[in-house]
Amino acid sequence: MRMSKRFLALLLVLFLNTYPAVAVDIPIDFSFTGSGYGHGVGMSQMGARSMAIGGSSAPQILQYFYKDVVIEPIDDSKIVRVNIGHLLTNTKISAGTDGAIVQFFSGDIGDQVDVLPLAVLPTKASLNLTVLGASLVPSISVGKKITSFAKGRSFTIRWSGTRYLTGADALISITHNGATKRYRYGQMQVRAVKDPALGYRLELTNSVRLSDEYLWGISEMPSFWPVEALKAQVIASRSYAMSKAGTYRSTCDCELYGEISDQMFLGYAKEIEKKYGVIWKEAVLQTAGLVMTQEGRPITAYFSSSSGGKTELALNAWGSAKPYTHIVDDPGSLDRALNPRFVTWSRTVAQPMIAAAFLLPDVVALEIVSRNESGTVGQIRARSSTGAQFTIRGETFRSRTKIPSAYFDLVGVQN
């Protein structure tokens, strides 16, 4: 007997109501265990520390962690532009020492010495710069009194004691995002730069001499570590900076970021560290001009805090081969006495961050697809509640989820 179409439709409705779709559980978070801190490419700082304790020299440390490099003197006296404030809406600049002379100029005046300043900051005054549309609006405040100036796209600040303005050594204080840092050298540039997502933002840079003014302020290794490890860090940092110097980046109005995306530039606070700041400065002096090169060019000397026992290739981490990176054993990173926090670690990451890492609406399961020779995760795959799948590099996953390293395992069974 034939069934009518209406009767078939009714049966289908009854079936769907009797057997509803199975709901998919979406985890609220995912857990991981791992080892090491950072990308693992190039020099392991914990490994360098361990080798220095064991009697290795700075050249021996560097030639172990970097493949086929030559350590040779190169002129590093050039001025580099270092970003010390990125995507800001405002910043405050003031004298960091009593009696300091702070001058404020319109435009980016570079090395010009015959330009008249818009103003000289009075004692206990602050220069405030705020983004308004595509311009910066400057004002000087002394107590409750505020003096405004014409807006512009860029400004320059100089202070006494630098190569541009004679007088007793002075410091300048920079305050933004709730933090204040002091700088002794160079000159400051402030520029309004358009960001694709945020619109115009303020970029603050410090132009300093690479050989000393920049390197004295690099804070990438504790200054109380063994001297040969410090020297290795100085040469690596100098090499990295030399490889970047001369390439202008419009997004930051700089050649180098003063953050971990390049190298942490702390400024004056590094060289005045109690007891140990002078040791860091001495390490800079004792390695003057020394740079790691390959085929006559400075290498981009990547380094990170520690690994999971072996260092990593740039190709594995970022998909771009660098002939001076290779995989070597790194037992120092697994020394609990030296690296107690990161020989092993555990982290839990919330669902929204995991989903964002894969550009998916949600993630119900993770799967490690492959591992590299170094032990890092090569690729990791996510599956969403809709069945969609997406695969990314282990290092990309580390960066997006803020877990310590790509030397990790999944905790628990995720189906």
Image (tube, rainbow, N blue to C red):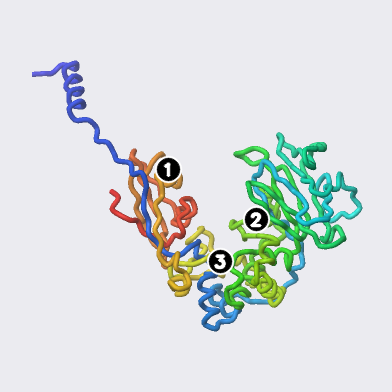
Residue that label 2 marks = 257
Residue that label 1 marks = 352
Disc 3 versus disc 1: distance between alpha carbons? Answer: 30 Å
The answer to whether residue 65 of the structure is visible from this angle is yes
Which image quadrant for residue 229? bottom right
Disc 1 versus disc 2: distance between alpha carbons? Answer: 29 Å
The answer to whether residue 329 of the structure is visible from this angle is no
Q: Amino acid at mark 1?
A: Pro
Residue that label 3 marks = 303
- Which part of the image, by quadrant, shows the N terminus? top left
Q: Amino acid at mark 2?
A: Tyr
Q: Does residue 153 appear to the left or right of 218 in the view shown?
A: right
Q: Amino acid at mark 3?
A: Phe
Residue at 73% x, 53% y: name it: 173
Which image quadrant for residue 280? bottom right
Q: Is residue 50 above or below residue 133?
A: below
Disc 2 versus disc 3: distance between alpha carbons? Answer: 16 Å
Residue at 66% x, 60% y: name it: 266
Task: Tell me the number on the disc at residue 192.
Answer: none
Which image quadrant for residue 375? bottom left
- Label 1 element class: helix
Q: Are marks 1 and 2 in contact (CB under 8 Å)?
A: no
Q: Is residue 153 above or below residue 210?
A: above
Picture coordinates of residue 239, whole percent (x, y): 65, 68
Picture coordinates of residue 20, whole percent (x, y): 22, 30
Q: Are marks 3 and 1 in contact (CB under 8 Å)?
A: no
Q: Is residue 269 above or below residue 153?
A: below
Label 1: how many residues lie within 10 Å, few (<14), some (14-19) or many (20+)?
Answer: some
Residue at 75% x, 60% y: name it: 184
